[in-house]
């Protein structure tokens, strides 16, 4: 919320012809210069909502992956090769999932952030783009929230098993409730 406070300050409802009311950024009112304000705002959005989170996620997942690869278990000298191979395979799956989730974030939000930067820095290109381009870009960004659960489901057998148990548990509770209602 704090990061997007500038958007709440900048956008306001204006009267326009012939369409009536529309929402527009008041870059000129706040910054004194519309183009500089737009460039500053969209650079701010790119850094704080895309580049810094992507960097933070990447560094965190790299550190986590290194910790997983290098961890030692008590009594590891006595561990069989079969267990060591299973542990190695499990670690590979986790690291693969972390890379895929990070790539999904980067790829889903890249069109929106690119659109913002084109809007701020190349207005002629922005004006030449068809209207639907902005909708498609924003759709990809917001689709990231819908893609993540599917990625976890596809990439993690424990997640699939837990989800299956939750669904089965909910359906069995529902059937027990219906049975009680029938006999009451």
Image (tube, rainbow, N blue to C red):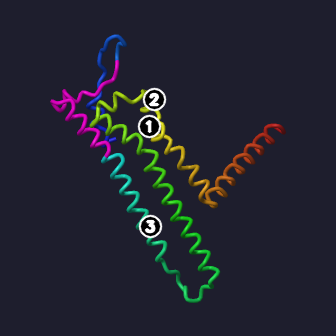
Circle on res. 132 = 2
Q: Position of residue 168 (x, y in %)?
A: 72, 50
Residue segment shown in magenta: 22-46
- Give the residue drawn at x 36%, y 41%: 114
Q: Is residue 90 magenta?
A: no
Q: Nearer the viewer, mark 2 or mark 3?
A: 2
**Whole-number angstrom distance, CA of label 2 to CA of label 3:** 39 Å
Front residue of 62/121: it is 121
Q: How many marks?
A: 3
The quarter holding residue 181 reads top right
**Classed neighbour count for the residue bearing mark 1: other residues with Cα under 10 Å, few (<14), some (14–19), many (≥20):** many
In the picture of the structure, the residue carrying the numbered disc 1 is 137
The quarter holding residue 39 reads top left
Front residue of 122/157: it is 122
> In the image, is 121 to the left or to the right of 90?
left
**Whole-number angstrom distance, CA of label 1 to CA of label 2:** 9 Å
In the picture of the structure, the residue carrying the numbered disc 3 is 64
**Whole-number angstrom distance, CA of label 3 to CA of label 1:** 31 Å
Where does the N terminus fall, quadrant-wise? Answer: top left
**Classed neighbour count for the residue bearing mark 3: other residues with Cα under 10 Å, few (<14), some (14–19), many (≥20):** some
Judging from the image, what secondary structure is the residue with disc 2 in?
A: helix
Judging from the image, what secondary structure is the residue with disc 3 in?
A: helix
Asked whether the beta carbons under mark 1 and mark 2 sit within 8 Å of each other, the answer is no
Q: Is residue 63 above or below residue 180?
A: below
């Amino acid at each position: 919320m704090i990061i997007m406070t500038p958007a709440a300050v900048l956008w306001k409802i204006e009267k326009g012809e012939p369409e009536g009311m529309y929402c527009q950024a008041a870059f000129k009112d706040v910054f004194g210069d519309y183009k500089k304000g737009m460039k500053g705002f969209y650079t701010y959005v790119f850094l704080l909502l895309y580049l810094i989170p992507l960097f933070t996620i990447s560094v965190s997942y790299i550190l986590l992956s290194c910790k997983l690869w290098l961890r030692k278990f008590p009594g590891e000298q006595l561990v069989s090769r079969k267990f060591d191979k299973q542990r190695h395979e499990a670690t590979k799956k986790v690291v693969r999932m972390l890379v895929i989730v990070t790539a999904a974030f980067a790829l889903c939000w890249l069109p929106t952030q690119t659109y913002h930067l084109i809007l701020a820095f190349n207005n002629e290109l922005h004006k030449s783009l068809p209207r639907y381009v902005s909708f498609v870009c924003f759709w990809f960004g917001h689709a990231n929230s819908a893609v993540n659960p599917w990625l976890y489901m596809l990439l993690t057998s424990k997640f699939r098993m837990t989800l299956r148990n939750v669904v089965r548990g909910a359906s069995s509770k529902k059937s027990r409730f219906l049975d009680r209602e029938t006999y009451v």
